[in-house]
Amino acid sequence: MDLTLLSTRRQEEAIIALRQDMPALANKIYFNYGGQGPLPTASLQAMVERWRRIQELGPFATPVFPDVEELIASLRQTLAALCGVPPQRLAFTENVTSGCVLPLWGLPWRTGDQLLISDGEHPGVVATCHEIARRENLQVGTLPVQDCSRADQVLERLDQALQPRTRLVVLSHLLWNTGAAMPIPAVGQRLREHPEQPWLLVDGAQSAGAVPLEEAAAAADLYAFTGHKWLCGPEGLGAVALSQRLLDVGAPTMIGWRGLAKDPEHPLHFHGDARRYEIATSCYPLMAGLLQSLHCLGAVGNPHQRLACIQVRSGQLWSGLRALEGVETLLPEPPPAGLVSFCVEGHRPQQVVNALGKRSLVLRSFENPDCVRACCHVTTLPAESGRLITEIASLVTNSRSV
């Protein structure tokens, strides 16, 4: 038997099994993984079981601490491996924004330094950078990449935007609105050649769980991601991978007991690794849920295999939409991952989302740029993309007949 066919069949069987374990997919067609991924029932059960175990041991009794520490170490190791970094360079956070924000406040800024922010970044990170600039007397520049779909375009724009005093570049791995992939390893190389060797902050909100992370995380000084989107974990838990050079100069910002090294002779000394950015008590059962979600996705394939599947799914949707009159996709080439953004003639994006919602199709609208975003994951079926294409075609036809 053809081993490729066998592998594909096993992957399809694993995808069906995963879909059947996701209640959110039972009564709707879900295209909003970029907002929040559906949680497998197995992950919910893992959290409930962990909560029950903590209560049985005693939430602050001596026997519970080794149990919790083992859970923390296991998830740290798993996420560090996903990023291709040593565990001591990974810190837990609540979400992408906190993963970006906490290290930024502790960097040694100098008056007149420039923060170079792409025009495709999330407002939470952008607002933080502007506030840091206000307090530290820094300059803010814009890296225009939102209309770029090729690596050479991005690098050309970067070369034009870099200044002698550029100290930080902020760039998403996948732009959250258009879905374009940014050439993070090449950007990192450019910055290493710059006289100031600016830090590189990478927002991985739309990449973790959708594309392999190792090369981008190796190029970044700060790679922040969350578990509740493409990793299909619970909300409220994320992580950030930090470079050693950032750890060498970065100071903790929000201070709490988890960031302390627990050295009896120096009780106020911080951890020498990424744990200095962890603060205090967290909801540890969430870690059990995310670990289970990672296991569920792993059953479908490794990150490269899952990406290949996602690209087939999103490519089918992209091609079908482009074949419709009155529909324009934001990317001129097939999506590099699972984000498919498009515009519908005669309809505001929110109107499209509302109309599709009444037909049990879940998508999201954007205002900058004006578009509708559909997210195709490994659990997205070709028939679901076909249904979305049919419904969009119906919207266009109806608007033209009015």
Image (cartoon, rainbow, N blue to C red):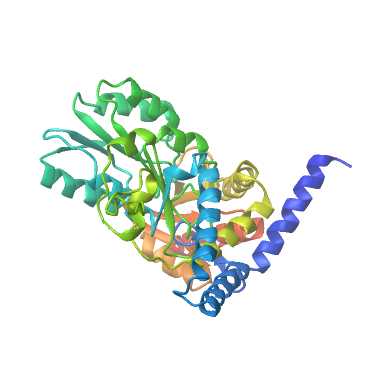
Q: Nearer the viewer, residue 281 or 92?
A: 281
Q: Position of residue 141 (x, y in %)?
A: 20, 36
Q: Judge from the rendering whether residue 95 lies leftward or rightward of residue 22; answer left or right.
A: left
Q: Judge from the rendering whether residue 34 lies leftward or rightward of residue 138; answer left or right.
A: right
Q: Nearer the viewer, residue 179 or 127?
A: 127
With respect to residue 152, does 117 lie above or below?
below
**How many labels were placed on the picture?**
0
Quarter of the picture holding the C terminus: bottom left
**x 17%, y 49%: residue:** 131
Q: Position of residue 45 (x, y in %)?
A: 60, 73
Q: Going by the picture, which residue comes out furthest to the front?
A: 265
Q: Judge from the rendering whether residue 350 lies leftward or rightward of residue 134; answer left or right.
A: right
Where, by quadrant of the figure, is residue 278 drawn? bottom left
Where, by quadrant of the figure, is residue 153 drawn? top left
Q: Position of residue 294 (x, y in %)?
A: 59, 56
With respect to residue 73, does 3 lie above or below?
above
**x 58%, y 67%: residue:** 43
Residue 127 visible in rendering: yes
With respect to residue 150, does 358 lie above or below?
below
With respect to residue 115, does 74 lie above or below?
below
Q: Nearer the viewer, residue 256 or 134?
A: 256
Quarter of the picture holding the N terminus: top right
Q: Position of residue 58 (x, y in %)?
A: 49, 77
Residue 325 visible in rendering: no
Q: Nearer the viewer, residue 216 or 49?
A: 49
